[in-house]
Amino acid sequence: MKKIYSTLLLFCLTFTLAMSQVLYDADFGTDGEGFPDHTTSNPPAAGPASATGGVATNDWTLSYDVTPGTDGSANQFSVDAAGKMHIEDWGGEAQFESASIDISAVDAITIDALGMTVGSSVQNAASEFFEYFYIIDGVETVVDVPLSGDSAGDPVNLATGTIDVSGANTLVVGFRFNVNGAGDGYDICSFVVEEVALPVELTKFNVSKTDDKILLDWQTASEINNDRFEIERSTDANRFSSIGKVKGEGNSQRINDYSFIDDQPMQGENYYRLKQIDIDGAFAYSEVVSIEVAKAEISVSPKSTLDQISITTGNASSIIVRSFSGQFMSSQSSTDGNFTVDMTNYPRGIYFLSININGNVQTEKVVRL
């Protein structure tokens, strides 16, 4: 299973949720559901072991692989009379996992949990930790909750913000922990998944060539608090940089058409995506689209020489000559695209020509014999 790790910093005890429909609300309504309290005289079941609770479709499973340690006091991982999942002096590692949640008809969700520490310094050993996780179609994201110098009642919350789940089918949420200390643990008061409306409903995103430029056009069917779109470009579909922005409509329930022209596309494959940014700074990315820009017909002759090389680009352009180690050797510009580079006094070795045509850079290799 693939995992993606992030860190959650805790600053407040409560949070406000703005949702449209509850998809999962963990049922902590029955006192005692979970694992029976264990002690030295009443040891736990040998691991691996599991216990279930809650009512469909808000049910859940508790589990552990390694048998937890015991002492003379009660070691708990179960629902208490106050309607929360209570963890105290458990004696090892364990997990809470929701039932599988159907998200096949959902475009976006939020995942929120409300919890707090029981006792103080609950992560005072290297093995102790607490983390939330969610699994979308088999891909797991882990949100670590680091605690240091904590006291009883400190928050252990999760608030993911909007997650785009368009095209996904299943979701599982949960948490894991390792805690071992008299009076130390966690209270998890709620674990909720809700469907939310995407701030912008993007209905199309296209790219096309117009002469030597690239036209991007997209359309939205509705917008909520949409501040702007930033247009990002990449040549490898991994590392993107911003090349411009277009103001959004803010709030709209009608079709809006947008466009942007990239007047200096890169030669070869160009990848584009939209970064939609809300008024409050929250953002989401569109799908990635791509288009190929043909490389210019550049002539370099000869490729190996004792004295001079000739370069023809057919357009106004410039060149920079660098050594194999990156040392600058010379540069030229030409309105007709014809160049002669004298390499007579260059040391023997490999050199690179960076040829810039209207912002598009192409590299050629030559050898000084």
Image (tube, helix red, strand yellow):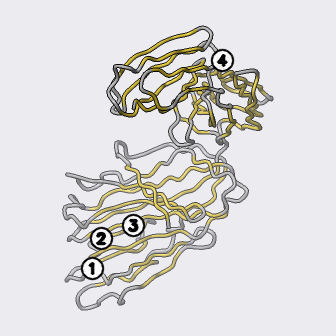
Using the image as rendered, state which of residue 277 and residue 302 is in the foreground. 302
The label on residue 314 is 4
Q: Are marks 2 and 4 in contact (CB under 8 Å)?
A: no
- Quadrant containing the C terminus is top left
Q: Which residue is mark 2?
A: 88
Relative height, residue 136 to residue 88 (above, below): above
Q: Residue at x 52, y 44 (%)?
A: 161
Label 1 element class: loop
Amino acid type shown at disc 3: Arg
Q: Which circle's residue, 3 or 2, is located before the other in the chain?
A: 2
Q: State the image coordinates of residue 113 (x, y, percent, origin top left).
A: 47, 55
- CA separation in Å, label 3 and label 2: 14 Å
Residue at (80, 29) in percent of width and height: 255
Where is mark 3, residue-wise?
176
Horizontal and vertical percent position of residue 210: 76, 22
Q: Compute the Cα span from label 4 to label 1.
A: 83 Å
| Image disc number at residue 74 | 1
Element type where label 3 sits in the image: strand
Compared to residue 213, the image places residue 235 above or below, namely: below
For the residue marked with disc 4, what is the amino acid? Answer: Gly
Q: Nearer the viewer, mark 3 or mark 2?
A: 3
- First-in-chain label (4 vs 1): 1
